Image: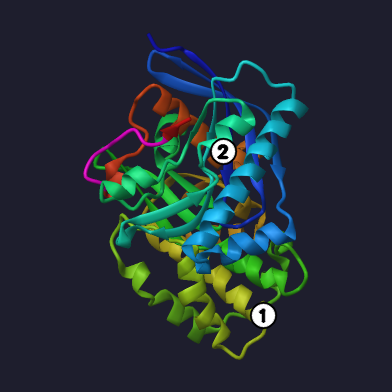
Amino acid sequence: MFKHNYNVIGVMSGTSLDGVDLAHINFEINDGKWSYKIFECDTISYSNEMISKLKNGIHYSSSELSELNIEYTNLLGNIISEFIVKNNISNLDAVCSHGHTILHQPQNGFTLQIGNLPEIAKITNQKVVCDFRVQDVLFGGQGAPLVPIGDKILFSEFDYCLNLGGFSNISFEENKERIAFDISPVNTVLNFYANTFGLEYDDKGKISESGNISLELFDELNTLEFYQKPYPKSLGFEFVQEIILPILENYPISTKDKMRTFTEHIAFQIGKILQTKTGKLLISGGGVYNDFLIDRIKNHLPKTEIIIPDEKTIQYKEALIFALLGVLKLRNEINVLSSVTGAKQNHSSGEVF
């Protein structure tokens, strides 16, 4: 018999590199319906040295990647252990950890999330469920996005669930199947340019708002091949480094103008996905704090009711959902949907250490 109550920690590190998100969560399942409560949560920032390594890992040799994987697994294990001790958390069923994506090339049958080595279980002295993406790629899927099954199970009252993180991604029901895909880069690009002003991010979108749109750049971005592709589809940091940034850097305009244009691009692409839709749109992720971006999304979606949830759900929704994926794996239940990733079948993904 399966349990009806699970005491777990969800751990997530996103492409925006703002740190490791940890959330202590209790899940309950009654009559097939899941509910959750988020207790203690925290974001542990990376050192500048680690940020540099995570940014540049895409260019590392296999031996350098192996070393980085060991170093990052040790770091992540210690961060999780300190979180457990600091918050006096006991009787955990599992720690459910995403790791950090370094390479994501599903078209080549390959994805790498570091921090998922078996040693993490020894360091934390806990059962660890991790490495959720690899199996899906082996099944011919994109390995992403994985959050939509959590949207389906935990946030079914919303018509659409949009996440604004390093990239934007969306999920919704279509013909009684969950559909989800990445839309465009978001904070991977905006933070890159905010960094040039000595800032971690563009606070409330004030820098972007002060710029002017370059229509020529706006049009070039919107004609990129990725935006014409049907879903399922997903993006990795490679797309930003190899395609987006070279285009932006090719324009002799101010950084503010690049940020303003890219913000409009983000909102336009989101609006294009939902332009004929009404209903409720739940928005989460760090991008919700970018007031200007939210205003531009509202401008492109005038008929859509936009809902921003409570603070913990905004900040820790991905950690929450990877915690759920871990629990589903423990129950040997489906936690990845083929309708979302394009894999040959639904499956229960992840490693248990």
Q: Is residue 270 above or below residue 96?
A: below
The residue sitting at the left extreme is 344
Q: Can residue 285 be seen in the rendering of this structure? A: no
Q: Is residue 163 above or below residue 41?
A: below
Is residue 38 found left or right of 98 in the rendered image? right
Q: Position of residue 97 (x, y in %)?
A: 53, 38
Q: Residue at x 71, y 69 (%)?
A: 195
Q: Residue at x 68, y 32 (%)?
A: 81
Q: Position of residue 3 (x, y in %)?
A: 45, 12
Residue type, label 1:
Thr
User: Mark 2 or 1, which is nearer the eye?
Assistant: 2
Q: Residue at x 69, y 21 (%)?
A: 89
Classified by dominant secondary structure, the portion drawn in magenta counts as loop
Is residue 54 found left or right of 168 in the rendered image? right
Residue 313 position by quadrant = top right
The residue sitting at the top extreme is 1
**Mark sitting on residue 255:** 1
Residue 202 position by quadrant = bottom right
Where does the magenta region start and end? 343-350
Is residue 134 found left or right of 322 in the rendered image? left
In depth, the one of 228 and 291 nearer the eye is: 228
Q: Earlier in the sequence, mark 2 or mark 1?
A: 1
Q: Secondary structure at mark 1?
A: helix
Residue 292 on the magenta span: no
In depth, the one of 269 and 4 nearer the eye is: 4
Question: Pointer 2: what residue?
Answer: 319
Residue type, label 2:
Ala
Q: Residue at x 67, y 50 (%)?
A: 19
Q: How is the image coloured?
A: rainbow
Quarter in which the N terminus is drawn: top left
In depth, the one of 152 and 122 nearer the eye is: 122
